[in-house]
Image: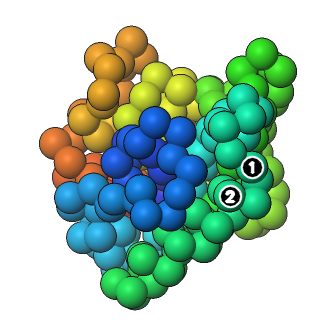
């Protein structure tokens, strides 16, 4: 059985900058390194799913995003934290694409490309928004919320105090499903 943590990026792993477009704006939130290390210790796959409508809105390019993600992966690698994959939705909300969270497109691509089978493997989603909680609901996986910027309308299965608390809950749930 695989264990998978689907992770939101902005507001969950790093501080929510308004349409982050430059690598120097990246600020890893407190408890995130520790939480990711805990998940790794328990052999979780780490997969980022992030809505990046700033591309569709013309605020930054796909190249800018790739530079940011290279920087982001480098920062975490310094703490020996390696991600399995990053998926992003570049579309404007008006495009009504299938990949923008809370829709399942990115997650379904991840399942296929990473050979994850939710009927046997264990997965959680850790995020900070209704889009994240909605995606977890749509995919029928556990929804764990870190403190949100805006009050959540979609109730999470667990409201964590910070990312380390969220990761601890993910580990606890995975132990129950063994
Ligand atoms: Zn999309």
What residue sits 50% from the left and 80% below the top? 74
**Quadrant where the C terminus is found in the figure:** bottom left
Q: Is residue 21 above or below residue 35?
A: above
* Local SS, label 2: helix
Percent x, y of residue 110: 73, 55
Q: Is residue 42 left or right of residue 122?
A: left
- Would you identify the image quadrant in which residue 43 lies? bottom left
Disc 1 target residue: 61
Q: Nearer the viewer, residue 131 or 122?
A: 131
Contact between marks 1 and 2 (CB within 8 A): the answer is yes
* Local SS, label 1: loop
The residue most toward the top is: 153
Q: Is residue 158 above or below residue 106?
A: above
What residue sits 32% from the left and 75% below the top? 37
Q: Is residue 89 left or right of residue 163?
A: right
What residue sits 20% from the left and 48% below the top? 162
- Would you identify the image quadrant in which residue 53 lies? top right
Q: CA distance from mark 1 to mark 2?
A: 5 Å
Give the label on residue 165, or none: none
Q: Is residue 38 above or below residue 20?
A: below
């Amino acid at each position: 059985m695989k264990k998978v943590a689907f992770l939101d990026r902005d507001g969950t792993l790093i501080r929510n900058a308004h349409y982050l477009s430059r690598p120097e704006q990246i600020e890893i939130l407190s408890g995130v390194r520790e939480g990711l290390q805990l998940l790794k210790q328990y052999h979780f796959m780490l997969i980022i799913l992030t809505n990046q409508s700033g591309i569709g809105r013309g605020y930054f390019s796909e190249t800018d995003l790739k530079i940011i993600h290279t920087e982001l992966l480098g920062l975490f690698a310094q703490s020996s934290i390696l991600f399995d994959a990053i998926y992003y939705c570049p579309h404007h909300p008006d495009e009504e694409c299938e990949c923008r969270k809370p829709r399942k497109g990115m997650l379904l691509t991840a399942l296929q490309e990473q050979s994850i089978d939710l009927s046997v493997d264990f997965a959680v989603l850790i995020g900070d928004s209704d889009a994240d909680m909605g995606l977890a609901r749509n995919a029928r996986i556990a929804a764990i919320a870190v403190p949100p910027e805006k009050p959540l309308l979609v109730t999470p299965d667990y409201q964590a105090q910070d990312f380390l608390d969220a990761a601890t809950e993910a580990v606890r749930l995975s132990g129950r499903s063994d």
